[in-house]
Amino acid sequence: MDRLKVNIGKLELRNPVMTASGTFGYGDEFTDFIDLSRLGGIFVKGTTLEPRQGNDYPRMAETASGMLNSVGLQNKGVDYFLSDIYPRIKEYDTHMIVNVNGSTLEDYVACTEALADLDKIPAIELNISCPNVKEGGMIFGISCTSAANLVKAVRKVYDKTLIVKLSPNVTDIAEIALAVEAEGADSVSLVNTFLGMAIDAEKRKPKLSTVTGGLSGPCIKPIALRMVWQVYKAVKIPIIGMGGISNWKDAIEFILAGSQAIQVGTYNFINPTVSVEIVDGILEYMDRHNIDSINDLVGKLDY
Ligand code: SIN
């Protein structure tokens, strides 16, 4: 299985297939369906310094080939994570990576510090791209200066693998990727959701309590793929690609566009075994094309 091994910063993954934050709980919700040790890693639910209630309901709406969410980072806070969640997930035989959020720079730094010494959390994903909160989140991710300042501050307190999750709601995503790379990010993950909205025409009302929300699912795949390709041409650090991946072919497309690894998100809600099916499909593809190592495919788009 060494053929599937990839590296992201100091992290060695047994394969490039991981699950995206907010779509896979803490992993335990999926143990009836799949063997978690078959995954390269699991990005757990977005975590903040303090508990958050999230936004009012309704905060989900189905769209053509996708969904909108405006969850608003509902979680019980980092202390609860340490006391109640970490002890039960730390034995999983895969990399458990925490998605870190905050309203202020100080929040992000404090949340990161709380996680920094946990043996079984080898990396964090700094989420500068949540479009569903009034403070923090995407606000940090849509300007090079604020993204760079945040990464610089977090880098000072965190020496394990630092992955920065980028927003697609920008004019030039490569610029933001370059700004966070310059401040010491080990990797960028992209893309988070696209800001969108849905309307109930009969009621003349928005379908989400927050009016706007984040669009994900197969409908965003072509745009996400384009952004991965643009970032791949700009940065040297490894890219974790995501955005509408629903089968092994999508995963291979993201790898050819420049992703060292991928995350499966919204499709986990439709097919809870899709992530391991993607691992199997990638291997079959490699056999058919006589590829010895998955690394030989990264960015190998022929154009
Ligand atoms: C949310 O909790 O609102 C979604 C998280 C995200 O988009 O990063």
Image (cartoon, rainbow, N blue to C red):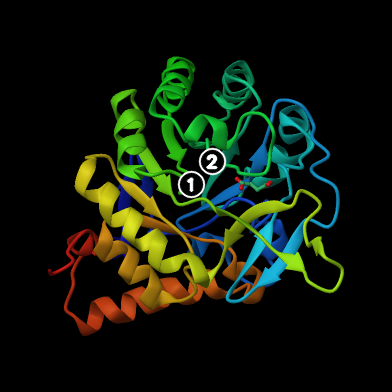
Considering only vertical position in the picture, is 252 above or below 102? Answer: below
Foreground residue, 20 or 104?
Answer: 104
- Please provide percent x and percent y for residue 62: 70, 70
Residue at label 2? 129
Residue type, numbered disc 2: Ser
Q: Residues within 10 Å of mark 1 (few under 14, many from 20)?
A: some
- In the depicted structure, whether residue 35 falls above or below residue 174: below
Element at badge 1?
loop
Q: Quadrant of the N terminus?
A: bottom left
Contact (CB < 8 A) between labels 1 and 2? yes
Task: Look at the numbered disc 2 and give the secondary structure of its residue.
Answer: loop
Q: Residue at x 66, y 69 (%)?
A: 269
Residue 198, how many percent across, how many down?
Answer: 70, 64
Hey, which quadrant is residue 11 in on the image? top left
Numbered tag placed on residue 169 in the rendering: 1
Numbered disc in front, either 1 or 2: 1
Ligand 1 neighbours mark 2 (CB distance < 8 Å) = yes
Q: Is residue 150 above or below residue 30?
A: above
Q: Is residue 293 above or below residue 146?
A: below
